Image (cartoon, coloured by chain):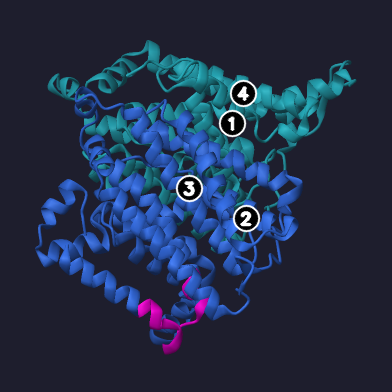
Chain colours: A blue, B cyan
Amino acid sequence: MNKSFIGYGLLFAALLAAPFVGAYPVFMMKLMCFALFAAAFNLLLGYTGLLSFGHAAFLGGSAYMAGHAMKVWGVTPEIGLVLGTATGALLGWVFGVLAIRRQGIYFAMITLALAQMVFFIALQAPFTGGEDGLQAVPRGKLFGVLDLKDDLTMYYVALVIVAAAFLLIVRTIHSPFGQVLKGIKENEPRAVSLGYDVGRFKLLAFVISAALSGLAGSLKTLVLGFATLTDVHWSSSGSVILMTLLGGLGTLSGPLVGAAVVVALENKIGELGHLLASITRVEWFNTLGESVTIVTGLIFVVCVLAFRRGIMGEVIALLGRGGKRAEAAGGGH
Amino acid sequence: MSVSLPALLSQLLLGLVNGSFYAMLSLGLAVIFGLLNVINFAHGALFMMGAVLTWMAMNYLGVNYWVMLLVAPVVVGAFGILIERLLLRWIYKLDHLYGLLLTLGLTLLIEGIFRSAYGVSGLAYDTPDALSGAFNLGFMILPKYRAWVVVASLVVCFVTWFLIEKTRIGAYLRAGTENPRLVEAFGVNVPLMITLTYGFGVALAAFAGVLAAPVIQVSPLMGQNLIIVVFAVVVIGGMGSIMGAILTGLGLGVIEGLTKVFYPEASSTVVFVIMVIVLLIRPAGLFGKEK
């Protein structure tokens, strides 16, 4: 616990210093939004054992809500974020109530289908801007005083929000509530026989995860100034699964690492392709930038077949600090 | 609101056509899930492969539609057998979720490869000569091709139903679904049966793809929206019964067609709305058994 505390302290310090050592703030903020999204998702899959295939709806739905509120209603950013988070929570409650009626694989299919419904609504509804999305959302002034137009100011505000949300997730996992979730994940009938109302615990975990995904979505709109159909498309749900799986299911740091790798890959894969092409002289690599899905598909297959612990899961196992225990108990680092 | 009878009937027919695809795809998903415990996310991508392979054979090799109706399922089925032997077999002992994730990865891979070759725009695809044109039934115009799709899918669905419910091979399959270890103890080669089942289910998807090609726009992404609707169909029907999968598929296609006539805005979401209602009233699905 102490060592990982130092680790997160160092990470936070590095993020504080990042803009001064040449990192591009907007890219870093995008990264942080997805890291939060993945961490929220991991709360559900890694710690409760529920595979939601509908998290795109929470990310995208709240991105639209926050964007609409800030652009059309002209509310201040903090109200926009609150409204977005509430949208995520509400959608999460509706999805959860329905999906929890079935288990396992059906749970995944139901959440996927519901999210697809949200996608079609976003495609047709008048306030989402259809194919173009919601463009030119103003950043405004936080609490009416702090102007967020400056990227650096925005960066530190985003950092504080994401760090606070991450602490909330850590706190949830280590709370008695989190322990019950782990208990449900490991053996649901046992949790039932111990007298826990499993359905209620699952639902609450689902709502928390959806709300935090909503926070990530609205923060992303605030930072980038737009909300588009890409966020609500099922491929977003797929990519958050990939982030969590690649980073390490049921580890605290895994989703952060996974999100960083996946977002960096999606953004820089073209350059990587050109580099590979110049080294290997294989012309095809130049088109790698358009073939992100091939690469992500490959990573998926490799992760499932040979790399199920994920990057951080392997690191924890390597460090030998109870790697097996972390896997069995759902981690703690 | 007044709706003319021919318009209504033609939407109904279109609904039946879509319903046939839902039926064939959910049938394949149900058969595969029964034996492999894997939800085959790649079903949509393999459906697309059937259609695109047919397009390629017609354009590059001049092979005709009827040949491809047989060849495409065989090729895709063989590809499915490869997938099962090389990849899926390693994950049967793991949580079901990994099956979904692995086939999701395969979907991205397959679609990505076809996308880098053909982009995302539609590929032109002609209806075979023998099936172009329409019958004039007096009260409506019945395009020959659509009638053919419905008839061909119904025949395939019922043959599958017959195979599984009424023959000896089907009995092994059903027994394997219930208790694979016991069936294996009786000397049945269960791993082979699993491989062939996956190949068959996937071939069914490819057959649907070939049939769909002249009606739905052929593109590398044609499978991905369809598969999500089919998932909803599977949730509505429950995967317990073969006939249930067929009837649910057809029925939902028809309802979707009718929605296009009476309230077009809802036509893309109606299946999901029905799913929600079914979940509230009968969580196990219309034909499902509570496990």
CA separation in Å, label 4 and label 3: 33 Å
Tell me the amino acid under the disc marked 3: Ala
Q: What residue appears at the point 49 percent right and 59 percent down from the top-left corner?
A: B113
**Near-viewer residue (B269 or A180):** A180
Relative image position of residue A188 (x, y in whole percent):
24, 30
Mark 1 belongs to chain: B
Q: Which image quadrant is residue A120 in?
A: top right
Residue that label 3 marks:
A211
Question: Local crowd at mark 3 within 10 Å, few (<14), some, or many (≥20)?
Answer: many
Query: How far is mark 3 from mark 2, CA to CA?
Result: 13 Å
Between circles 4 and 3, the one closer to the viewer is 3
Note whether A318 is above or below A20 in the view shown.
above
Which span of residues is magenta-colored? A14-29
Lower position in the chain sequence, tag 3 or tag 2? 2
Q: Which mark is residue A66?
A: 2
**Where is A259 relative to A285, above or below?**
above
Q: Say which amino acid is labelled 1.
A: Phe
Q: Secondary structure at mark 4?
A: helix
For the stretch drawn in magenta, the main secondary structure is helix
Mark 2: amino acid: Ala
